[in-house]
Image: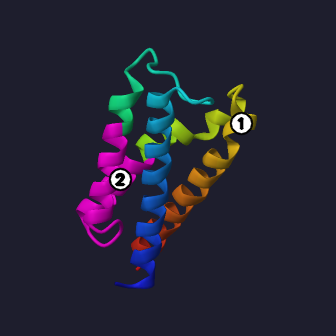
Amino acid sequence: MTQSSRSSQAALAVLIILHLFMLATLLAGVAPHPPAQIPLFGLAPFFAATVSALAAAMMSGAVESRAGRGLTVLAILLSLVSFGPHKVIDPAFPLIWPAVVTAWVAIGALVMRMIAARRG
């Protein structure tokens, strides 16, 4: 396994762990936790879909294959729903910023790896 694939897997693992902890806080009702649902869908099933996409991206090689890159893009987009820039205006941001900033770093690392892989 190359260093670049390790860094991609590490970034995906960070996002998986963050989403699983968000799901755990939601289920346990530990503050600050995400709401159980938003107007579009329930968050527990959304977290499950996001973690599944992240795990699939990790298992298929995040940047090594076309499928891996596609799954990584999907996983990044799903992760941005939970940790995107809109969280800065969230009233809970002072309580959740460590998770949000950590997710931004992981997403940034994945984007940089995908750009580097694309350039060859």
Residue 88, position in %: x, y?
A: 70, 36
User: Which contiguous range is marked in magenta?
Assistant: 48-76
Closer to us: 49 or 34: 34
Q: Is residue 71 visible?
A: yes
Report the side of 21 relative to 92 (left or right).
Answer: left
Residue 95: give its label. 1
Report the side of 57 relative to 3 (left or right).
Answer: left
Closer to us: 22 or 15: 22
Q: Secondary structure at mark 2?
A: helix
For disc 2, the marked residue is 54
Asked if the stretch drawn in magenta spans residue 67, the answer is: yes
On screen, residue 105 above or below 75: below
Q: Secondary structure at mark 1?
A: helix
Residue 46, position in %: x, y?
A: 36, 32
Residue at 57% of width from left, 40% of height from top?
84
Asked if the stretch drawn in magenta spans residue 57, the answer is: yes
Q: Residues within 10 Å of mark 1 (few under 14, many from 20)?
A: few
